Image: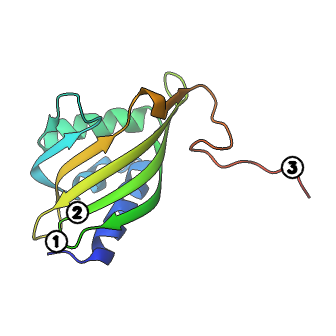
Amino acid sequence: MPDEAFRKATAQQYAQRLNEGDVEGTLALFTDDVVFEDPVGRPPTVGKEALRRHLTMSVEHQVHETPEVSVTSMCDRFVVTSSKVVLRAPTVMNFRIIGIVEFNEEGLGTHVRAFWGMTDLTVGEARHTDATPAVSSRR
């Protein structure tokens, strides 16, 4: 089973690859039969081909994900990460998400659950507290 450091690093790799527009590299982190629930409550995306379509759409909408805190489980199967996510098309949307990824013995993601609701979403330009960094005018 993957250790804690591996699981936490994978959460960072997911965001980095997606932010770079590397759909194939992002897909490589998951099993062929991955179940991807984003958000939890909608019908899940099942399998790599369906996930490819979801990730491609995210990249086309200029996704930028910033993982914050990752926490693992004693059973060596899960990592939970809070993230800030910005999509920029058709309009700017900012999300605060809690993601839970379950790993198999080979260290691939088998099940992803993204928890967010309407109160975790803002539409319009990001504020300093949202998913984009503040720009300081101090010298």
Residue on which disc 3 sits: 137
Number of other residues with Cα within 10 Å of mark 1, as a class: few under 14, some 14 to 19, many 20 or more: few
Image quadrant assignment for residue 53 = top left
Which numbered mark, 3 or 1, is in the foreground of this view?
Answer: 1
Residue on which disc 2 sits: 78
Residue type pointed to by label 1:
Cys
Residue on which disc 1 sits: 75
Residue type pointed to by label 3:
Ser
Mark 3 secondary-structure assignment: loop
Residue type pointed to by label 2:
Phe
Asked if marks 1 and 2 touch (Cβ < 8 Å), the reply is yes
Q: CA distance from mark 3 to mark 1?
A: 47 Å
* Residue at the image position 32 percent from the left and 37 percent from the top: 56
Query: Image height check: is 64 above or below 121?
Result: below
* Residue at the image position 34 percent from the left and 32 percent from the top: 57
Q: CA distance from mark 1 to mark 2?
A: 8 Å
Which numbered mark, 3 or 2, is in the foreground of this view?
Answer: 2
* Residue at the image position 35 percent from the left and 61 percent from the top: 11
Mark 1 secondary-structure assignment: loop
The picture places residue 136, in percent across and down from the top left corner, at 81, 51
- Horizontally, residue 135 falls left or right of residue 67, namely right
